Image (tube, rainbow, N blue to C red):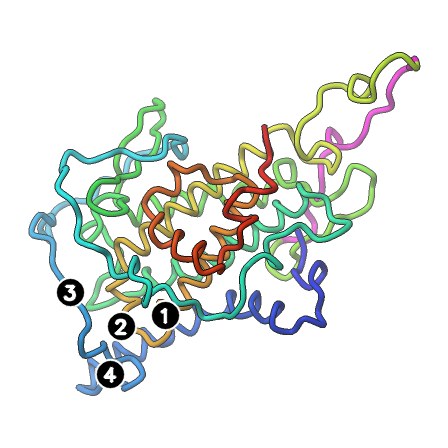
């Protein structure tokens, strides 16, 4: 789970710049949002952050709770594995701006295959661990954008986003301590996902940083503690006498994805859960906050598209996201598949992991 430069061909400057830009764009967006607020305060507007003349109106929600409504955040146990909870309102939604091809442009050139495919001589489980850490790092920057304060309140708050939704018909829930799915405000849901994902990638058992053969795997030292070590239970145990009439898989005991690289049996399940939850945050960013704040900030929508296209390419290539998971964003994903931004191998799940 190391620096991407360890795996990419640095002679391909454009390819590596994609990764560097993905980690930086949200910081620039936050700065742009701060400038926009300063412009409003001073009675001026930065031309680079002006809303397009034909831009959409910002619509309010007549069903929002009052400013005095209490926000009850329940004690929680973990993310749900069910994909969505479909609302009772069956009326069709108007076409979303981000589902229009002219608004599906990326902030980078080329397709995402060089960044998604497992490099030569790298274990697939190691690569997915690395991708999970990197994708969360990119997403976290965009989350920070909607956590900025605007007119005294965070952009994403229990009043503007009383549920974790992705459009009119899809609401995501969280499991409470009794194992029951419950709706929570989007800001609370996102915070719980962040806490869950960070707890996993910092857990030396769930995401070990030492290989089972005693050599250190590539850890993300720039962002995460370097002193995390695998427990002794992750190191190989000498096997007893063997016979030549037994298969290698039988000799090595039960097998699972990532075992050879020192990952626990639950690793793939944890990775899929992390990707499913990160996807839900992207879906909420688009459905709940495309207009506020991303539409109003120069290049913000293109950069959000780049990050999500990269995320979706990896998720589809390795089968980490199912068709039902992808449902809220299918029209946008289909645009990228059609124009080659998401290459055919990614779209077809050419390297899907069956387990």
Residue visible at 41% across and 38% down? 323
Q: Give residue 307's position: percent from left, percent from top.
A: 46, 60
Is residue 308 found left or right of 116 in the rendered image?
left
Q: Which residue is mark 3?
A: 58
Q: Is residue 125 visible?
A: yes
- Distance Cα–Cα, label 2 vs label 4: 13 Å
Dot placed on the residue nearer the N-terminal end, 4 or 1 = 4
- Distance Cα–Cα, label 3 vs label 2: 11 Å
Q: Which residue is mark 2?
A: 296
Magenta stretch bounds: 225-243
Whether pointer 3 and pointer 4 mark residues with C-beta atoms closer than 8 Å, the reply is no
Element assignment for label 1: helix
| Mark 4: few/some/many CA within 10 Å (<14, 14-19, 20+) | some
Q: Is residue 241 visible?
A: no
Residue visible at 23% across and 85% down? 45
Dot placed on the residue nearer the N-terminal end, 2 or 4 = 4
Q: Quadrant of residue 253?
A: top right
Element assignment for label 2: helix
Q: Which residue is mark 1?
A: 300
Q: Give residue 134's position: percent from left, percent from top.
A: 56, 55
Q: Main secondary structure of the magenta part?
A: loop
Element assignment for label 3: loop
- Distance Cα–Cα, label 4 vs label 1: 17 Å
Q: Viewer-proximal residue, 33 or 69?
A: 33
- Distance Cα–Cα, label 3 vs label 1: 17 Å
Q: Viewer-proximal residue, 265 or 224?
A: 265
Element assignment for label 4: helix
Is residue 71 found left or right of 227 in the rendered image?
left
Image depth: mark 2 or mark 4 in front: 2
- Distance Cα–Cα, label 1 vs label 2: 8 Å
Q: Which residue is mark 4?
A: 39
């Amino acid at each position: 789970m190391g620096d991407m430069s360890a795996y990419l061909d640095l002679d391909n400057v454009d390819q590596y710049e994609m990764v560097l830009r993905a980690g930086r764009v949200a910081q620039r967006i936050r700065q742009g949002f701060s400038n926009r607020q300063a412009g409003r305060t001073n009675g001026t507007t930065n031309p680079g952050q002006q809303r397009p003349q034909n831009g959409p109106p910002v619509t309010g929600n007549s069903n929002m709770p009052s400013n005095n409504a209490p926000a009850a955040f329940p004690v929680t146990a973990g993310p749900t594995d069910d994909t969505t909870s479909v609302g009772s309102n069956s009326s069709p939604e108007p076409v979303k701006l981000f589902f229009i091809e002219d608004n599906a442009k990326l902030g980078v050139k080329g397709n995402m295959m060089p960044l998604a495919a497992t490099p030569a001589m790298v274990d697939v489980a190691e690569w997915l661990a690395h991708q999970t850490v990197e994708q969360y790092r990119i997403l976290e920057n965009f989350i920070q954008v909607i956590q900025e304060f605007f007119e005294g309140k965070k952009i994403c708050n229990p009043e503007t986003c009383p549920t974790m939704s992705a459009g009119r018909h899809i609401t995501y829930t969280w499991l409470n301590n009794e194992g029951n799915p419950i709706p929570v405000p989007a800001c609370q849901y996102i915070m719980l996902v962040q806490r869950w994902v960070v707890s996993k990638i910092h857990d030396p058992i769930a995401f070990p940083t030492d290989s089972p053969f005693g050599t250190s795997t590539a850890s993300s030292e720039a962002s995460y503690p370097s002193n995390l070590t695998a427990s002794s239970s992750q190191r190989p145990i000498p096997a007893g006498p063997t016979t030549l009439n037994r298969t290698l898989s039988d000799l090595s005991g039960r097998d699972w994805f990532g075992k050879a690289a020192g990952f626990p049996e639950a690793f793939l399940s944890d990775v899929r859960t992390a990707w499913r939850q990160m996807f839900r945050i992207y879906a909420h960013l688009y459905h709940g906050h495309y207009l506020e704040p991303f539409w109003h900030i120069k290049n913000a929508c293109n950069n959000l598209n780049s990050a999500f296209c990269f995320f979706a390419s990896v998720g589809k290539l390795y089968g980490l996201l199912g068709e039902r998971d992808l449902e809220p964003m299918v029209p946008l994903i289909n645009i990228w598949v059609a124009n080659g931004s998401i290459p055919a191998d990614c779209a077809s799940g050419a390297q899907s992991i069956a387990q």
